Every structure is written in structure tokens, then in C-alpha cells.
Amino acid sequence: MKRVSEFVSNSDCGDLFWSINGIGAPDLTVVYVPAGCKVENPVCLRYISVEGRDEGSNELPVSNPRVLVLVERGGEIGIIEEFLGKDGQKRYWANSVLEVMVGEGGKVRHSYIQRQSLNAAHIKWTSVTQEAASTYELVEVSSGGKLSRHNVHIQQLGPETVTELSSLHLSVSDQTQDLHSRLVMDHPRGYSRQLHKCIVAHSQGQAVFDGNIKVNRYAQQTDAGQLTRSLLLEPRATVNIKPNLQIIADDVKCSHGAAISDLEESQLFYFLARGINLETARKALLFSFGAEVVERLPNPVRKEVESHIRELLDPTLKGSS
């Protein structure tokens, strides 16, 4: 297909892991949406790592899935990516790349759910280009992997373009959950919102957020917002955050904020004063903290993700109460 060949040949994004995927990917999966076509049901891509090694082994099986989503002018589609491990304790490395091109006036709703083995390495690249008046929405829930990193690079290529990013990271073991995002806005009247939330519920767990939004000179009348909030539930839990707005244009409305805390005593007291025990109060507050992101997932996967989060957090809550 000529359009696919043109896009692939012009793709120069990425780093070492991107290059390893390009060398190791056995094939390329293409999702093509013609101009004006609106796909009613989301396309589900489920990656299951079936090979793995026990802890202490010198071998590390590697997989390199690669997907290209090409949406022509006025097209719409939903993409659901799920990354799973067949065995929750095996060691392996999943090194995935997703490229998305959204044509003028097009819309892509992208859901990304990562539930790999707690001993796995998971590296994910998401590269997006958006033409004028297009919309790209990402909802991410990441809870697996010993080391998990998501690189998100987005470039707005025309005016009146909308980008919305929502992510929830959970570190319930000695895990590292890492998100590096970069959004480049070069044209007038662009709109972006980024919400990042994480819960670190283990003394050796950690989370990293490096979010960069760049508003260049010609991106006048831009409206960009970025917010990161983190909950640390153990004394030695760690989070490193770096929200970053680089603004060169002078006619913009931009804001960002960051907050790191444990559950607030005043909120817990509110429940206790009404006869609700501490464990139930902590559950309600934690689930509501993540619900702002989870409720944005499409119906086919939302209930499953909610159940998985409850299973992960319940043992921690019982130990804390």
C-alpha cells in the first residue's frame, strides 16, 4: 500500500529500543481506516507473552510487536491494546511499538492496558502525528512488569488539533513504573490535556513521570493543561516527577501542577466519623483516586480492569489497616 510505505519511510522517531523493535519485529500489523469511515466497534489487540524463564535464569525471551494505525481524513476508530503474561512470575521482555497517523478531522481513541508478569521488562513506544482538526485520546492503565516504561511522542501538524492523555500507574511490588511523554504544538488553537496519576504501595516500589509539552512560536491561542498526582502508601516508596511546559508563543492559556502525598487524614476521619472502618475507607479513597482515569476506558475492558485493580490493592489495604 502506497500510503503505508510513505508513512513508514518518513518515520524517524525513537531511540535504541525503537531500533531494536525495528530489527526484531517479524512483521508489521496495519490498521487502515479510509477517508470518512467511522469504525463502530473498537479494534482489540491482545499481546500475550507465552515464553518466559524462571528467576535466576540467564535467558530472557524477547518479543517485538509493531503496529501501524493509519486513519485518513475524517476517519474514526477505537484501538484497545492489552499486554498480558501467561505466567505471572516468569521473566521476559516485551518491546512494543505503535505508530498512529491521524488525518485531518480524524479521531483515534486509544486504550492501553499493561498487565505483564511482575518479573517482566516492558518497554512501549507510542508515536502519534495529528493533522489539522484531528483528535487523539489516550487512556493508559499500567500495573505489571518489574520494569515498565512507556514513551509517548505526539506532534500536532495543523491548527485546532485536540490531544488528551490520561494515565494511571500502580506499583504494588518492587516495580518501576515509568512514563516519558512529549507533545509538540506548532499551530494555532491547539488543545491538550494531560492527567497522570500513580499509586506506589510497596516500600521498594517507584514511579517516574517526565512529561514535556512544548508550545512553539506559531502555536498562538493554545490551551494546554498538565496535572500529575501521586499517592505514596509506604514510608520508603518513591516517585520522581518532572512536569514541564515550554512556552514560546505569547498568546496562550497554559497550566500545570503536581502533588505527592499519602491518603489525607481529614478524608479518612470523614469516613471514620460516620462509622466506616479504616480498611473500607482506604479502599474507597484509593479506588476513587484511580477511577478518574479508569472510567474513561471503553465498556469492553473497563470492568475487567476495575476488578484487577481491586485484586492488586486489597492485600496492601489489609496489611495497612
Image (cartoon, grey):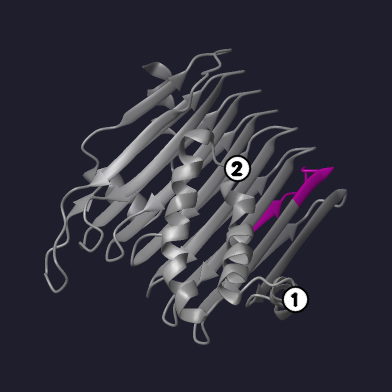
Residue flagged by tag 2: what amino acid is it?
Arg
The span shown in magenta is 211-224
Q: Which residue is mark 2?
A: 296
The image shows residue 150 at horizontal and vertical percentages of 45, 55
Q: In what element is the residue under mark 2?
A: loop
**122 over 132 or under it: above or below:** below
Q: In what element is the residue under mark 1?
A: loop
- Mark 1 surroundings within 10 Å by alpha-carbon count, few (fewer than 14), some (14 through 19), many (20 or more): few
Residue flagged by tag 1: what amino acid is it?
Ala
- Mark 2 surroundings within 10 Å by alpha-carbon count, few (fewer than 14), some (14 through 19), many (20 or more): some
The image shows residue 192 at horizontal and vertical percentages of 71, 45
Q: Nearer the viewer, residue 258 or 72?
A: 258
Instruction: Give me the C-alpha separation between circle 2 and circle 1.
Output: 32 Å
Name which quarter of the figure residue 199 lies in. bottom right
Q: Nearer the viewer, residue 264 or 159?
A: 264
First reached walking from the N terminus: tag 2 or tag 1? 1
